[in-house]
């Protein structure tokens, strides 16, 4: 899958603010960071998680993840087409949804949020199998979202295994 479509256009902050799809796809401006936009976008997603999503009951949190994921396929696809670039580095909605998947049913604490952040970013950057396959072979909005959603799911499983292991270790002491 090529990284670029024809007619690549770099987003500018004023234009981004007038375009709701690009504004959301660029993580409400966090994706405009000149340094590590994916990481900055993930920080923004963590802030939203902590203040708005962590207090939700699990069923509502699950609904937010579903809406962010399905809506993100459309959102990232639209922004990508408007910019003329497949998976522009500033499109960070996929990081938002991926981190929120990573934190599904994980205890809301600064420690678990920090661990989720680090593990998710490592998986998103390193792109181990199957993340790498999805990143390389799937196009459009689905391709932009899929690798981050799988990295988020892998992070979530890792966290739940760690939580279970720590719970088991506490039971032994």
Image (cartoon, helix red, strand yellow):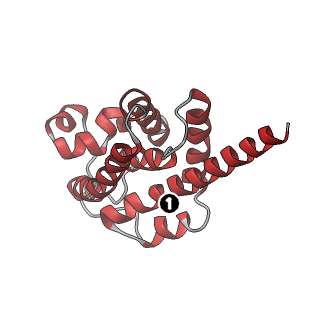
Secondary-structure class at tag 1: helix
Residue 106's place in the image compared with 111, above or below, is below
Q: Position of residue 22 (x, y in %)?
A: 23, 44
* Residue 54 in the figure: left or right of residue 28: right
What residue is rendered at 31% in x and 61% in y?
Answer: 141
The residue lying toward the viewer, choosing from 95 and 79, is 95
Q: Position of residue 105 (x, y in %)?
A: 50, 45
Q: From this viewpoint, is residue 91 visible?
A: no
* Residue 86 in the figure: left or right of residue 166: left
What residue is rendered at 56% in x and 68% in y?
Answer: 130
Residue 100's place in the image compared with 17, above or below, is below
The residue lying toward the viewer, choosing from 85 and 78, is 78
The residue lying toward the viewer, choosing from 5 and 130, is 130
Quadrant containing the N terminus is bottom left
What residue is rendered at 35% in x and 62% in y?
Answer: 4
Q: Position of residue 137 (x, y in %)?
A: 45, 73
Q: Quadrant of residue 81?
A: bottom left
Q: Position of residue 108 (x, y in %)?
A: 52, 33
For label 1, the residue is: 150
Near mark 1 (Cα within 10 A), the count class, few <14, some 14-19 or many ≥20, is: many
Residue 74's place in the image compared with 61, above or below, is below
Q: From this viewpoint, is residue 163 visible?
A: yes
What residue is rendered at 24% in x and 39% in y?
Answer: 23
Q: How many marks?
A: 1
Quadrant containing the C terminus is top right
Q: Residue furthest left?
A: 18
């Amino acid at each position: 899958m090529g990284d670029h479509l024809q007619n690549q256009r770099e987003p500018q902050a004023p234009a981004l603010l007038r375009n709701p799809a690009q504004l959301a796809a660029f993580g409400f401006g966090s994706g405009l960071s000149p340094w590590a936009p994916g990481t900055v976008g993930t920080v923004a997603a963590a802030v939203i998680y902590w203040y708005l999503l962590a207090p939700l009951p699990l069923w509502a949190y699950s609904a937010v993840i579903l809406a962010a994921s399905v809506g993100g396929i459309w959102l990232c696809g639209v922004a990508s087409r408007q910019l003329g670039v497949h998976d522009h580095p500033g499109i960070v909605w996929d990081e938002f949804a991926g981190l929120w998947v990573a934190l599904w049913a994980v205890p809301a604490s600064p420690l678990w949020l920090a661990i989720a952040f680090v593990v998710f970013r490592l998986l998103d950057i390193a792109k181990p199998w199957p993340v790498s396959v999805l990143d390389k072979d799937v196009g459009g909005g689905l391709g932009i979202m899929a690798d981050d959603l799988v990295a988020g799911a892998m992070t979530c499983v890792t966290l739940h295994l760690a939580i279970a292991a720590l719970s088991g270790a506490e039971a032994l002491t």
